[in-house]
Image (cartoon, rainbow, N blue to C red):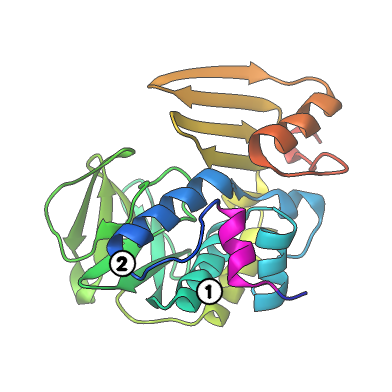
Amino acid sequence: MSVDVDAYLKRIGVTTPVSVTAESLRTLHLNHLRTIPFENLSIHLGETISLDEAPLLDKVVTRSRGGFCYELNGAFAWLLRELGYTVTLLSARVFAGDNPGPPFDHLALKVDLDEPWLADVGFGAFASHPLRLNDRGDQTDPAGTFRIADAEHGDLIVYENGEPQYRFEAHPRELAEFEAMCWYQQNSPKSHFTKSPVCSRLTDTGRVTLTGRTLKRLADGETTKTTLKVEAEILATYRDLFGVTLDRLPDDPREA
């Protein structure tokens, strides 16, 4: 199954042609977050997650699914490169409290234009727009206030509203280097991705997230939660709010 750039752009609601500029990158980034959900449903459906180009693009573009960081940022990197952007894959360690996790815990992107930008469409609730990589001051975004700070060994730490999110290195990586941690995230009982099925998407007014049977809507600063009890209602929610069509519910280990 081959996927072309026009199909990907149609998937995220962007019309051609697309110029290689910071403004276009901002549009691509925002539209990606609003149309392609952050989700771990493959893990709970028994589907193998592949980082090979053909099955990855088939899943995200042709099958109208989402994914987690390796898939979403991996696919986004492909699109940007096809459009003419210079993209570097970065290994990041996600913070749990004050301590960062293991290497390759997260995949982020550096995009070089007139200046370098940090792009990330695979972290769930995060910056809506790319961040200036060389800016050490506060960067205001619809999602909050972000700041990038220097760390040891040339690493950088990105903060959201004063809280560290992840520490990333400047060394360029290939997507294949993330495969071992991708396998771990799919299979380890210690991985938070194996705890419960999650599907989340940015909206015009906030965010919508379905975790198991709990639907949470954030709109204009107000959060509401609803418990969905009927299987048909849950499947319809995946379809109508996230564009994900399933023929059965993902398994939820909390209900086992």
Q: Position of residue 79 (x, y in %)?
A: 52, 70
Residue 143 visible in the picture: yes
The chief SS type of the magenta part is: helix
Q: Which residue is mark 2?
A: 21
Query: Looking at the rendering, which quadrant does residue 75 occupy?
Result: bottom right
Q: Is residue 30 left or right of residue 48?
A: left
Q: Is residue 47 left or right of residue 225?
A: right
Which residue appears farthest toward the left when viewing the image? 137
Magenta includes 256?
no
Q: Secondary structure at mark 1?
A: helix
Q: Position of residue 123 (x, y in %)?
A: 46, 52
- Relative vertical location of residue 61 with respect to residue 145 in this rendering, above or below: below
- Relative vertical location of residue 28 with respect to residue 200 in this rendering, above or below: below
Which residue appears farthest toward the right when viewing the image? 247
Q: Is residue 124 left or right of residue 65?
A: left
Q: Residue at x 49, y 35 (%)?
A: 203
The one nearer the camera, 218 or 95, is 218
Q: Residues within 10 Å of mark 1 (few under 14, many from 20)?
A: some
Q: Residue at x 34, y 38 (%)?
A: 143
Amino acid bearing label 1: Trp
Q: Which mark is residue 78?
A: 1
Q: How many marks?
A: 2
Q: Secondary structure at mark 2?
A: loop
Amino acid bearing label 2: Thr
The mark that comes first in sequence, 1 or 2, is: 2
Range drawn in magenta: 3-12
Q: Position of residue 60 (x, y in %)?
A: 66, 60
- Relative vertical location of residue 11 with respect to residue 88 in this rendering, above or below: above
